[in-house]
Image (tube, rainbow, N blue to C red):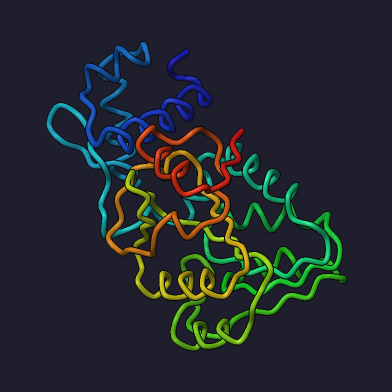
Amino acid sequence: MEYSRKAVSNRHENIISLINKNGFATVEEMAKLYNVTPQTIRRDINFLDNEGYVSRYHGGAGSSSSVENVAYTHRKELLLEEKKLIAGNVASIIPDKSSLFINIGTTTEHVANALCNHNKLRIITNNLNVAAIMSRKEEFEVIVAGGIVRSKDGGITGESAVQFIKQFKMDIGIIGISGIDLDGTLLDFDFREVHVARTIIENSRKVFLVADHSKFGRNAMVKLGSIREIDTLITDKKPPEQLMEVIIENGIKLITG
């Protein structure tokens, strides 16, 4: 059972979530928790370390680098069902004829797909993948921010993108994030990407943060802002207790599952 593709994929996701939550986990505790051999866990850790999800240490694994994100091609494959669930929930609370900012990220790309059943949306994005998805619908108006295109993921960053976005005030800003510290700090890896996302927050009437549970407690080096600036958090699982306290204290709407 432990060698089936689905079982391995689920275990990898669970290991990533465990390490993001606790910072470190030993081989022995993970073997016992997931009812597999220590050798299997070591293979899991080697794979996840090579892919950039965790860092391998003697006797266990810890959080991955705070200075470099996981490759886009691998992020696209991680937690697919959870991202689709989040996207569906986002689509269910966005009315037709809304104006939207949508930023860079694999989760926001799922949101773009889920929104294609809507009518007469106006979208400004710095994500070429989002633009490609949503421009297929004739009654959508899709505007792409100018700037530097990242070959790795189709994201557009730079001062030109920032200045372009500043010209608009949209109904809803939909943003993804690389990590959410348990004190509510929003974190990412690229300061240029953060500058654009920061501008989206400042020019949106409401801000929706889309993040799966693996982002809770995850490290990244650049501060985007605080979850206190967000109106609604859409995720797949209830956040850890410390983060929940921040959410409740600040009246942030939480949508899960």
Which residue does the image show at 64% across and 52% down from the upper left?
Answer: 110
Which is nearer the eye, 68 or 214?
Answer: 214
Q: Is residue 182 above or below residue 3?
A: below
Number of numbered callouts drawn: 0
Left or right placement of residue 130 versus residue 151 in this view:
right
142 or 48, which lies in front? 142
Look at 59% across and 44% down and name the residue there. 83
x, y percent for residue 56: 21, 38
Work out whether 10 lies above or below 73. Answer: above
Give the quarter of the image for residue 54.
top left
In the picture, measured across the screen, residue 69 lies left or right of residue 201, that is left
- Residue 164 picture location, percent across and down: 57, 86
Tell me the quarter of the picture where residue 18 sits.
Answer: top left
- Coordinates of residue 157 in the picture (x, y in percent): 47, 78
Given the current orientation, which residue lies at the most extreme left position? 58
**Image coordinates for residue 68, horizontal then vertical, percent:** 30, 59
Q: Is residue 186 left or right of residue 131?
A: left
